[in-house]
Image (cartoon, rainbow, N blue to C red):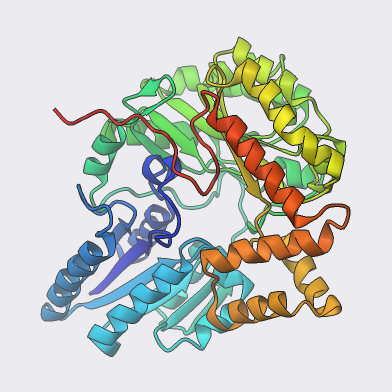
Amino acid sequence: MLRPIFIHCKPTVQHDLRYDSLMMVNASVAYLNSIAKALLGYPGISIDETYVSENAEGRERELLLNHLRGLITAYLSAGDEPIVFCTLLSYNAGPALQLLHDLKQEFTDRVRTGVGGQLVRVCPTAYLTNPDIDHVGVGDAEVILSSLLLGKQRFAQGYKRVTPHDHYAEPLYENYLSLDRRLDEMSRYRLGPFSGVRQLVTESVRGCAWASAYKVCRFCSLQGVDTWPVFRALKDHFRIEQHLAEHYGLNWIFDTSNQWLPTVNTIEICQWLRDYVKQRQVAVASPINRYVYLTSNSVNHRTAPLLREAGVRIAYVGIDGWDKLTRAALHKAQVDCMKMLRACADNDIFVRTSMVIGSGLTTQNLKELPQFEEQMLNEFGGKVILSLGNFLEILLPGSADWEEFEREAHQQNIEEAIKTFSFFRSHGYLSLDQEDRLNELRIKHTQRDVSLEEVLLARDKAVETVKRSLALSVTIRESEQLERPARA
């Protein structure tokens, strides 16, 4: 028998613990296991290294390896064939490749290994030349997993056409290592006014309404966001939620969609939400709160009451730019974010948000950034804004930012950047230090009206502004100030 094990590796230890790493149970391994069950007739095992057991902080890799040794040894003794797949993203590719190396060193060709995920699409050659990897997949697992798992192909590529009635795979949380204990641990934390959170992930929509209607955000590296957004058929959408509520006691859904609403037009949003609320009232028995991604132009005094009726309690809204120049440079809407926040305040919707510092910069708007945030936090900090991150625009492989700066690095002969891009092409990942330095080099060589020192100073002043407020998150690189009740 084939014995697939799907692993989402923990980020590098340089990444501090974030709220999302505890509260967002990784779903990629749950979707992969769903597809495997459809192919094999039985599930494999899903593992998120971020939480492998209680009291595991700092020892996750040790505990994971011991667990895998036991599984693989038992499978081999029974004459079964173990296969380990890892999903590679920019923040966890290094640890994932090290894990596969360690397994190959110990079990050699007795265990098959494979990789897929957003990062693999950018540079498959780096993984095809890696002796620790047997299978490389680019695209949608619904299309390629059979060729890798059953057909034993070295490389497979393909994408699935999605319709509301023929969507992507459903999440399968059976055989998800330590899921019940993780949900219990999650429920002990408090985020602003919320406690007792038991949150799982679904995917309702593919494509991005904002990217489809306007432009893909410059720092976005996800595939398929420029296609027309397709929301899962509402009947299936609510059925999945009800199943998760009944089986795992969840009371929150984290929807990882790019823009949860399948349109950006206010009239259409209102029409769609009225239908959503109507069908939700008929279909859903369990009270489920939603934490979803929205754009600042999709939340206003007309849409916010309907969003609240739909169960939205927290929205991650990418404000990103704070004046006309920064918003335009990031392909963001020229809307007043204060109006969005007031609409949320009036409808009991909380917001997590961020400022992306790195495009459209001038000496004047850098000076204005901390003042802008102070004004915003004075009115909404802790009352509406649960978290506000300030971070330099991140160069994600596959994004427009990444491709443009790679070309510019060669044109301007920016030696340090060229070496970093070359490292990625040969290794398939960057360390956090390399990422941070590449972000700084892009700003230094593309934002010619300001110095890097000015940018870093503005970022640091904005961070201090957040620290003085009631907002929890400081930056994407710093640990949030979460309240964690003591165990009874």
Query: x, y (%) of residue 450?
Result: 83, 52
Residue 217, can we see it?
Answer: no
Q: Quadrant location of residue 287?
A: top left
Q: Which residue is drawn at the image coordinates 46% and 83% (left, top)? A: 153
Instruction: Kindly identify the residue that appears in the image at 65 percent across and 36 percent down.
Output: 462
- Relative placement, left or right, of 87 versus 421 is left
82 sits to left or right of 360: left
User: Where residue 267 sits in the image (x, y, percent)?
Assistant: 77, 22
Q: Position of residue 22 (x, y in %)?
A: 37, 43
Q: Quadrant of the N terminus?
A: bottom left
Location of the C terminus (image quadrant): top left
**Residue 348 in view (yes/no):** yes
Location of residue 465 in the rendering, given as x and y in whole percent from the top left corner: 61, 31
Q: Is residue 83 left or right of residue 35?
A: left
Identify the residue at image location x=57%, y=43%. Answer: 257
Compared across the picture, whether 285 is left or right of 269 comes to left
